[in-house]
Amino acid sequence: MSLSELIAGVQTHEKTLTVFNADHAVADEIRRHFADRNVRVRVESTDSGRPGEFVTLTADGDVVTAVGLDAVRALLDDDATLGSGERPYQPFLDHLDETMFTSWSTEQMHATSREIEDRAFRVGSGAIHSGFQTVSTLRTELPVYERLGSTAVDVHVYATPDEMPPDLDDISLHLERAAEIAQSWFVVFDGGDEGSACALLAEEREPDEFYGFWTYERSTVDWILDHLESTYGPLAP
């Protein structure tokens, strides 16, 4: 399986959240809340208007749970059940992957990349592997990665050679002509001594248009690292 196939697999397992008999303002609020989740939000109405306002969550064509809209409103309001011990939306959350987030937004992906890089710097151990598509893009990010290289973090960067590569100290450069390196944007941190594993993986589907996900799930992070090692050689310094 390739990096692209992993991304496609995540997208294939997108769930559908259908809001019934609610006004569009409420539906828009729900859509904004789940904008970075692997969930598509739809709005529908029953012919009779009964049984009132409710929400269903569908996976692979099957309804996995249904809750009243008030339960989802409680989820939208972070303080709605704080300290009360009541979580009326729990049946809904039980069917969402709390470790997986998706996005079409390059701004969000840039922010997530910085979060992962900052995490690696704070932990100060382990290894980070980042794909920049091209050497010219890598060059624009060198200050961040030279700073990471000054720590005990093992830093690996991947790019296709569209120009002469820079001389790098304390950074392992993987020059690759593979299509998935040219098309993929990734930042993968193995968690170091704190076990704080996380990863972002995206692919360019149109010029400057990306789709991808980020995750805190250890098994997914390990799969990406294993793929990089088996495909592009040993990752040890």
Image (spheres, rainbow, N blue to C red):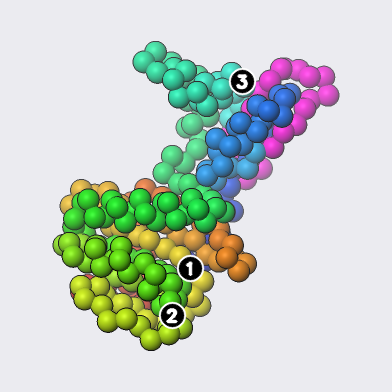
Residue at point 28%, 57% (across, down)? 190
Q: Neighbour class for label 1 at 10 Å: few (<14), some, many (≥20)?
A: many
Helix or strand or loop: what does disc 3 sit on? strand
Location of the C terminus (image quadrant): bottom left
The answer to whether residue 151 is left or right of residue 106 is: left
Which segment did they paint magenta? 42-64
Note whether 76 is above or below 10 in the view shown. Answer: above
The reply to whether residue 204 is visible in this rendering is yes
Q: Quadrant of residue 158?
A: bottom left
Q: Neighbour class for label 2 at 10 Å: few (<14), some, many (≥20)?
A: many
Q: Quadrant of residue 167?
A: bottom left
Residue at point 68%, 20% (across, down)? 53
Answer whether residue 44 is magenta in the image: yes
Instruction: Report how far apart the C-alphas of labels 3 and 1 lie in the structure.
Output: 40 Å
Q: Neighbour class for label 3 at 10 Å: few (<14), some, many (≥20)?
A: some
Viewer-side residue, 163 vs 16 = 163
Of the residues under marks 3 and 1, which one precedes in the sequence? 3
Q: Position of residue 142 (x, y in %)?
A: 32, 69
- CB contact under 8 Å: marks 3 and 2: no
Residue for badge 3: 68
Answer whether residue 148 is magenta in the image: no
Of the residues under marks 1 and 2, which one precedes in the sequence? 2
The answer to whether residue 81 is left or right of residue 36 is: left
Viewer-side residue, 101 vs 207 = 207
Q: Position of residue 235 (x, y in %)?
A: 27, 72
Helix or strand or loop: what does disc 2 sit on? strand
Helix or strand or loop: what does disc 1 sit on? strand
Residue for badge 2: 160
Residue for badge 1: 184
The kind of residue tagged 3 is Gly
Residue at point 30%, 63% (across, down)? 144
